[in-house]
Image (tube, rainbow, N blue to C red):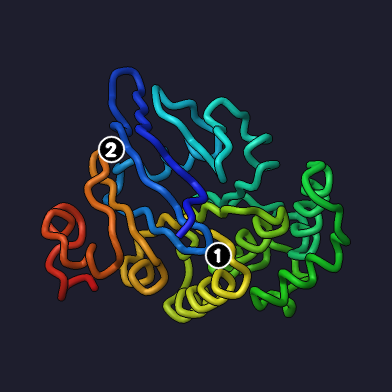
Amino acid sequence: MTSLLDVSHVSVSFRGTKALIDVSFDCQAGQITGLIGPNGAGKTTMFNVISGLLKPTSGAIVLDGLDLSKAKPAKRARQGISRTFQRLELFVSLTVRENLIVAGEIRNSFGRGERFDVGAEADRVMSLLDLVDVADVDVAALPTGRARVVEVARALMTRPKLVLLDEPASGQSEEETERFGELLRKLVDDSGLSVCLVEHDVPLVMRLCDRIHVLNFGELLASGTPEEIRQNTAVADAYLGAPEETI
């Protein structure tokens, strides 16, 4: 497999507190990579480093062979990194379709690759993520679980190489989470999109991800396939508990 994202020896300190300590991992092209761990493990901090919102104390971020360690968030977005956030960051006064169109127009302004028909692309993405029925609904009127899917759709409008999803199943019902997982897996398998997923729904992570990296107190505790992570006693002790209790 080809490594799309390489995170190398990343450390972050806040006023002497070490949030990330010499963390290295990769995300393979065309796969879903999980980044899990207890609250405070450093997952969102790592996403902020990858997307350029936070400058690390040390370390490097390389996307598709290009060192982006010193790049601003806008340049990283132009190079193909898109993300969602723990808190919904949608334009709540706009409809679902309008949210996607805004993202598509921003993408067309990047100057990377060919310009595309934003309206047609919005329709295509909504169809992929089963959002056609709410295309003209104001985002503010949507339940949280559906709004999470809109966030993913908006991220896809930038035609990214890598999407960082920060707790996308938060606020979803069990049925919504099941459907979301199916949609995301199909999207990756059909399009070759690469995804890095932070999520506390461990069964969802185990079903979806090709590989998983586990953070604990800012350090990389383990990396492996879902089965390898299930069997890792250090991970069980720090996060998962007994396998039959959580997975």
Residue 15 locus on image (x, y percent): 34, 18
Instruction: Give the secondary structure at mark 2.
Output: loop
Residue 184 locus on image (x, y percent): 54, 71
Instruction: Give the secondary structure at mark 1.
Output: helix
Q: Tag 2 or tag 1, which sits nearer the N-term? A: 1
Residue 54 locus on image (x, y percent): 49, 30
**Which residue does the image show at 39% across and 22% down from the upper left?**
57
**Which residue does the image show at 83% across and 43% down from the upper left?**
109
Residue 146 locus on image (x, y percent): 59, 70
**Which residue does the image show at 67% across and 59% down from the upper left?**
156
Q: Residues within 10 Å of mark 2 (few under 14, many from 20)?
A: many
Of the 4 image quadrants, the one containing the N terminus is bottom left
Amino acid on which disc 1 is placed:
Thr
Amino acid on which disc 2 is placed:
Gly
- 152 sits to left or right of 43: right
Q: In the depicted view, which residue is nearer to us: 93 or 196?
A: 196
Q: In the depicted view, which residue is nearer to us: 96 or 31?
A: 31
Residue farthest toward the top in the current orientation of the protein? 15
- 113 sits to left or right of 128: right
Q: Which residue is mark 1?
A: 144
**Which residue does the image show at 75% across and 57% down from the upper left?**
99
Q: Residues within 10 Å of mark 1 (few under 14, many from 20)?
A: some
Of the 4 image quadrants, the one containing the C terminus is bottom left
Q: Which residue is mark 2?
A: 218
The image quarter containing residue 34 is: bottom left
